[in-house]
Amino acid sequence: MELNGDFDQRVVIDTAASPWLPCPQPGMQRKPLDRSGDAAARATSIVRHASGSAFPEDEHGLGQEFLVLNGLCSDECGSYPAGTYVRNPPGSHYRPISAAGCEIFLKLHQFQPDDQRRVVIDTQSAQWLPGLVPGLSVLPLHEHGGEHVALVRWAPGTRFQAHTHWGGEEILVLEGTFSDEGGDYPAGTWLRSPHMSRHTPYSEPGCLIYVKVGHLV
């Protein structure tokens, strides 16, 4: 299956308006964002686990990354409340369960083979750093090679200078409204911009975004 597999194309999806689709596993639904391949596909999606759901163990040959959007997600290593960021490295095994139900932003099979560090960050209690301009706060989540992942909080009225993204940029708007010269992107919007794309972002009401750069080459 191929969905938004051309990384040279800009993609904007309002996930709040996208329908939930059934998964092969009972108790799971998803909103696909991009996908390349069949069973062990490179894929990005919003996934919903029903209350009381449990799933068979799965191996992720090129890793798994997720951010818990709401609810409580668990596996054999622990439980992850809303706001938790998790990376399971290539070759890891994962058996998800969710007693209360949850929604996660999930990326599969997208790591470099030597990216072997497991990461678990409670973003609700982690320390944020000042950004490059007044009004920006940054919570680094992971970096490896040219890839950088972070949460970025924009205070109301914050504006950033025009800049170019080597290796592209991917954003999920978690709160508020993020904007650039291409439009306004409310909470739930997923954006993917290609290698060497350029924009001038800002946020009038303020926002919180997940952002990943340097991984689309």
Image (tube, grey):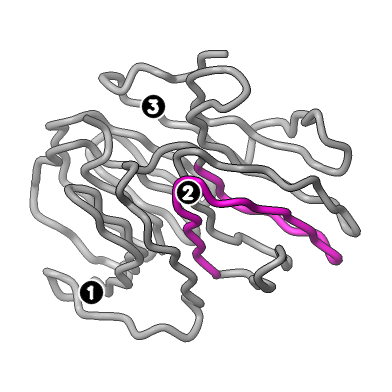
**Front: mark 1 or 3:** 3
Q: Quadrant of residue 112?
A: top left
Q: Which residue is mark 1?
A: 135
Horizontal side of residue 182 vs 190, given as left or right:
left
| Quadrant position of the N terminus in the picture | top right
Where residue 155 sits in the image (x, y, percent)?
Answer: 31, 72
Q: Secondary structure at mark 3?
A: strand
Q: Are marks 2 and 3 in contact (CB under 8 Å)?
A: no
Of labels 1 and 3, earlier in sequence is 3
CA distance separating discs 2 and 3 = 15 Å
Q: Which mark is residue 11?
A: 3
Q: Residue at x 71, y 63 (%)?
A: 75
- Dominant secondary structure of the magenta stretch? strand
Q: Secondary structure at mark 2?
A: strand
Vertical side of 118 occupied by 181: above or below: above
Q: Amino acid at mark 3?
A: Val
Q: Are marks 2 and 1 in contact (CB under 8 Å)?
A: no
Of labels 2 and 3, earlier in sequence is 3
Of labels 2 and 1, earlier in sequence is 1
Where residue 57 sits in the image (x, y, percent)?
Answer: 73, 47
Q: Residue at x 37, y 46 (%)?
A: 171
Horizontal side of residue 168 vs 14, given as left or right:
left
CA distance separating discs 1 and 3 = 27 Å
The magenta segment? 84-107
Let me know if residue 96 is in the magenta part: yes
**Front: mark 2 or 3:** 3
Residue situated furthest top in the rendering: 1
Q: Which residue is mark 2?
A: 186
Q: Are marks 1 and 3 in contact (CB under 8 Å)?
A: no
Horizontal side of residue 215 vs 50, given as left or right:
left
| Quadrant position of the C terminus in the picture | top left
Q: Residue at x 78, y 50 (%)?
A: 49
